[in-house]
Amino acid sequence: MTAAAPTATPVAGDIPRAILVGVDFGGRSHFDASLDELALLAESAGDNPVARVIARRKAPDPALFVGSGKADEIKALVLGHQAEAVLFDQALSPAQQRNLERHLGVAVADRTMLILEIFAARAQSHEGKLQVELARLQYLSTRLVRRWSHLERQRGGIGNRGGPGEAQIELDRRMIGERIKTVKERLVRVKRQRGTQRKSRERSGTFRVSLVGYTNAGKSTLFNALVKSRAYAADQLFATLDTTTRQLYLEDVGRSVSLSDTVGFIRDLPHKLVEAFEATLQEAAEADLLLHVVDAASPVLDEQTAEVQRVLRDIGADGIPQILVYNKLDNLAESQRPQVASDVLELDAGVRVPRVFVSALHGTGLIELRRLLSAAVMADRPTDLNPAEMASPPASLEDSPDDTFDSAHRRQL
């Protein structure tokens, strides 16, 4: 029915200890049985995961999400590990979050709040900070009853129905509503400025390429390797939030293209974040070509690829031609590496796209990637790209000519 196990040795210092909780509702939605991604999110937010709990239910408990019995087990783990927070891999309602905090005696956060905290800490540009602020305000506006629980509704005599708690909540809602309106207006201006910049690039005939992919797939590392930039890159979730655009010169066609690095995607990315980052994601939606970067060493690369395709559909970018860039070959065992530098992969709905295998960290496969980019630029129209022609003849990888890409990591045509 359940499982609970310690995960990592507590780190010395002031890093808050956290208990991770995931609930399997039986195939109705994706479930990470290992909770590895939640652990990475927790670490990115500055927490130290010390235990993991898996529960199985047919439906969420309206009050405590996991039910009273499981909540008691989690409370025992909190006391045993001296944890300071409990993190859930699914979204909690405001009432469930409030009830769990009262029952467990520690702070409770869901996946959405965790992602928002990471975004708030990582945003650097004015635009990025505005986008994160909007998403956080929209999330917080539904949880004011918990935020002001210290001001209980007071009742006096007849006609004295309200109290300071109720008044403070209404005041706070009004203030948040006004701030949301202000931030939205400022983001509209930012979006207008970006639109002006894009129109300028269109008039100049610039071919636009956007890097997209699951978070921590290595987009920023690849961006730096291609354009010799120093954009921030780290082995962590959401290392980069702000869009960076540079010119990439392609020797084969004797011209430059515009290359943009965008925010990474993740499973169950909060819808409000997708809305808030519309101005940034618009770079991908209006590109001529997408470089879809995939972590080739990830055991769940198919699920991650499908999630990126879903978000691309949500932002209206699913019709843009793609090149799949299978990155991090250096993280694969020798026996799992491909024999060729590029081939063709069939995605859902029978769409065939070129695929290239690279290690952005070591520079492997970048020459072949540049060749594919040049072929895309030379096409009369991006939609005329012929994946089979772009990916042939197959070029061998110089560092592993006799290796094969294991079927567990690859869907070979």
Image (cartoon, rainbow, N blue to C red):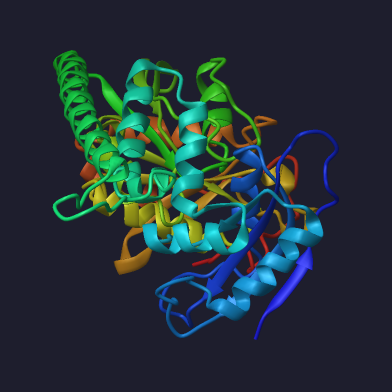
Q: Residue at x 44, y 77 (%)?
A: 61
In the picture, measured across the screen, residue 361 lies left or right of residue 204, that is right
Q: Is residue 188 above or below residue 296?
A: above
Q: Quadrant of the N terminus?
A: bottom right
In the picture, measured across the screen, residue 98 lies left or right of residue 136, that is right
Q: Position of residue 238 (x, y in %)?
A: 52, 37
The image quarter in which residue 267 lies = bottom left
List the single residue furthest toward the front: 157
Residues 275 and 217: in front is 275
Q: Is residue 8 above or below residue 365?
A: below
Residues 154 and 227: in front is 154
Residues 248 and 36: in front is 36
Q: Residue at x 46, y 30 (%)?
A: 120
All told, the count of numbered labels is 0
Q: Is residue 283 visible?
A: yes
Residues 185 and 370: in front is 185
Q: Position of residue 318 (x, y in %)?
A: 26, 51
In the picture, measured across the screen, residue 261 lies left or right of residue 22, that is left
Q: Is residue 392 visible?
A: no
Q: Position of residue 119 (x, y in %)?
A: 46, 34
Q: Residue at x 67, y 31 (%)?
A: 361
Q: Residue at x 79, y 56 (%)?
A: 81
Q: Is residue 185 above or below residue 58?
A: above
